[in-house]
Amino acid sequence: MTESRLWRALALAWLIVLLGCAGWLASQHRQLANRLDTDLFALLPKNERDPVAERAMASLSQASERQLVLLVGSADRDAAAHAADTLATGLKALPVTPQTQALDLDTLRDFYAPYRNVLFTPADASALAQGQAAWQARALQQAYATVSTSGLAWRDDPFGTFGRWLQGFGDLTRVRPDGGRLWVDADGRHYVVLMYTLNDSAFSLSAQKTVADGLDRAIAGLKAASPDISVLRAGVVLHAAKAAQQAEQEMSTIGIGSLAGILLLVLLTFRGWRALPLVALSIATGMTIALALTFALYGRVHMLTLVFGTSLIGVAVDYSLLLHSTSLGASVAAGKRLETLLPSLLVATLFTALAYLCLALTPFPGLAQMAVFAATGIASAWLSELFWYPRLAPSKLEPGVLGTPLLKLLARWPRLGRRGGLIALAVATPLIVAGLLKLTASDDVRSLVSTDGQLMKEQIAIGKLLGLPSPAQLFIVSGPDAQTVLERERALTRQLDGFVARGAMTGYQSISRWLPPISEQQALQSGAQALRDPALLQSLAHDLGLDDAWVRRQSAAPPLLTPEIWLASKASLPARHLWLGNTGHGYASVVMLTGLAGAAHAEALANVSLPGVRWVDKPAEISAVLDRYRDRLALVLLAAYVATAVLLWRRYRRDTWRVLAPSLIASIATLAIFGWLGIPLQLLTVLTLLLLLGMGIDYGIFVNEHPGEVRIVLAISLAACCTLLSFGLLAFSRTPALATFGTATLSGVGLAWLIAPLLRRPAASRPLFQPALQPDPPSTDQAP
Amino acid sequence: MLKRLLALTLLLPALAHADPDGKLLQDVQKRLVDAPVIRGEFVQERQLVGVKKTLTASGHFVVEKKRGVVWHTVKPFDQRLQVARDEIVQKDGKETLMKLTADKEPVVRTVGGVLFSLFSGDLSGLAKHFDVKGDARGARWNLVLSPKDAGMAKLIGNLKLAGDKSIEQVEMNAASGDVTRIRMSKVTTSTQMSAEDEADFD
């Protein structure tokens, strides 16, 4: 079969595919480098049930992803100012643009002034019901008052209502301008606030690195000059740069580590270099085609996919190692050997690839991408063996320095009989049960995403100092049209005022504060009729000496502020991120909370029940999704075992358990080990157990297909070693998700490999290609 | 010749009055009486844009270095303005009309600081926010303060101060065109507040 024309053509075609993919990657490598994601939250599940909430989250993160905020603090005000200027100068060369304060009271005053007679504070609005005498007295007091706060002349705000309404914006930010700088004070320290926006050019990984490194250098220089200066940083770009740097480090550690280990293992096990080309080709094909296909499929590839993908090096070599091992002292042509092994190879690959594809069953876009990468990589490596092994493999290989003693050693691998099995079971069961009893479950978001502790601390400090709202816990208000949304928001904010009064939070940001619903404006328009009463105005004009034109102007009905006018103006800039507009499911807006105190209050907020108002708690939601999927995948895992058992039954009958048991025992033991180590059970652990079923079954199949064949034991041992090497290195990843994968695979695959030969079929089967290797090979490897 | 003379007279005020190093303020500060408690009376005239009448009010004030300033208008309305470093409260008799605190309204600290400096005669704080010009050589000193900060300039056009041992006149020219002139008189000092002063502060 493998000598047929078709086969040769396929081998050539596969080569062309590989070269094509490699060429495409090489020609595009600059562009592709810019299409690498570092967003830490890409791993997190999308909100499948609520596209509006998803959109809200996306738009909020978009609004903030280009922001860089720095706080330069000192106990001495002048020192802080000086340090901030030095730092700002140091950052001039970076691809960032300094931002002035987002909230400019003058802009607001100028924009809102024409609508001042429909804009009232709640206190003034309720005071509208008071008689005209009271308002006349107020106007006179206002005229005689020493200070006016609105910035308008008295005649334009005679009752002072607009000035008071405008003052209400004061508590939106704790930042205040002073001497051309923005300041915030806390705990006896003065901080200068520096705000930057990343330039468009700064969206590549290298530019992010430039910004992060440049900032680090500038801060280091500043601190060297004046040690009492503190600098706080916040910005998505810093996390991204950190994550990218970490991912790059881990990729090179895992990549170089597993490559070096595997090559060394191959060189030592097989005499000469002739085993190397196919091993190298397996890795190259697996990685190249997986990378090309993932890019082609997703457009963007996440750095973590690459880190995870790098660990596939250890799996991709499995098939070539298997084939090479069986050719030790072989007498049959490479093609024939492949044909003999093909059924078990096919079954093994299928199981592994399917297990990896199970990752795609989760709602995590990051994991789905990893699944595609892994399954493609494994399938490609396998196809390479299928097409090229007959062409490239040496017809026979000799054991190398390590190969000969290994074969001797592995030949003595014991087989557990009934008695041995019972003893082992008796010893292991209490340990395993005790471990399982210790196992706890936890699906915290933090178990998925790693963030730099220091950066996180600084970011939280900045959030507190500036009174920034939480981006993860908020309300979404929706309705069929803009005005309904604004009215529903008002109903919500009335309840939120109660929460603020009770100290559950310090405040909230809502669009209706900037843009009161038309119905409310109309109510105020008619409610404020008293202030436009010509009799009142005439009397004021008479008391103070104003002309008739003033009376006419003041008594005219004020215009109403519409969303269109507001959105088109600069005055909406500070709050525009709260407006989602037409989402395709009607209109929606976001209400954000500041200084939310404690989880109990979050629960109370979750119970707010108003039409069109939804509480979104991203961390809680993600934990719930993780929890749900953990249970779901546990069932999938059980079903997978049952289905696999049924499939295996057709071939192995009463020995089915021998094939399945290594995976099963290794899985249970891994859970017990996690229990002993205090690592909680997570969704990812369950996923790893699925992978373990796929990989562990390989060992079971090979060992039981050819029991007593020491070269097969050598093959699975080599394969297991390579897998352990890669995933073992992955266990050291600083991304908790990958580390969990690594640890669980390390323990599971290690155990499955150790257990599989123990449970092999007792019958000495017919030898594979030639009489089984004797303990002393030199006499037999010269066979015809 | 005439031209040169004209140029010289135009230049002179600029040469004489620029105060880049705050020396002018220091000179004025030295002349001002310093005491823990300062009190006095005031007459305030407001000329509002579009309003024909000059609005005259009068009352008294108390400055206590630590607690701040009470600006108590008696005629034509009983109204109090209390200014501390980080709070401004406006009261109509006992009822609070307006209360601005610095932690909620960041602008308050700036505005409050300026008002505090102004009413308490602590001029050193003013240099931070204003460009200062003026003359302190004659029998009476006078100062013109223009805001440095663009945002503040949109509220306050300039401040004019004049006096001798105490600040006697303050003129606030709001950017909107409203003008407030205050004349202070009968300034006395003491080391402690009287019961009457205490009542003004509560």
Image: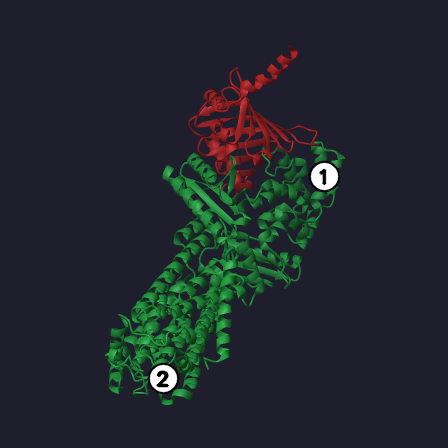
The tag earlier along the polypeptide, 1 or 2, is 1
Determine the chain carrying the residue at label 2. A
| Between A195 and A238, the one nearer to me in the picture | A238
Q: Position of residue B172 (x, y in %)?
A: 59, 29
- Give residue A763's quadrant in the image: bottom left
Whether residue B126 sits left or right of residue A737 in the image: it is right
Within-10-Å neighbours for mark 2: few <14, some 14–19, many 20+: many
Question: Residue at point 49% right, 23% down?
Answer: B25
Q: Which residue is mark 2?
A: A705
Residue A183, above or below A126: above
Residue type highlighted by circle 1: Leu
- Image quarter where the C terminus of chain A lies is bottom left
Left or right: A554 in relation to B77: right
A89 in relation to A236, above or below: above
Residue A511, percent from left and from top = 60, 53
Q: Nearer the viewer, mark 1 or mark 2?
A: 2
Secondary structure category for the residue under label 2: helix
Q: Position of residue A283 (x, y in %)?
A: 41, 67
Are the residues at dot 1 and dot 2 in contact (C-beta closer than 8 Å)? no
Q: Colour of chain B?
A: red
- What color is chain A drawn in? green
Distance CA(mark 1)–CA(mark 2)? 102 Å
Q: Which residue is mark 1?
A: A537
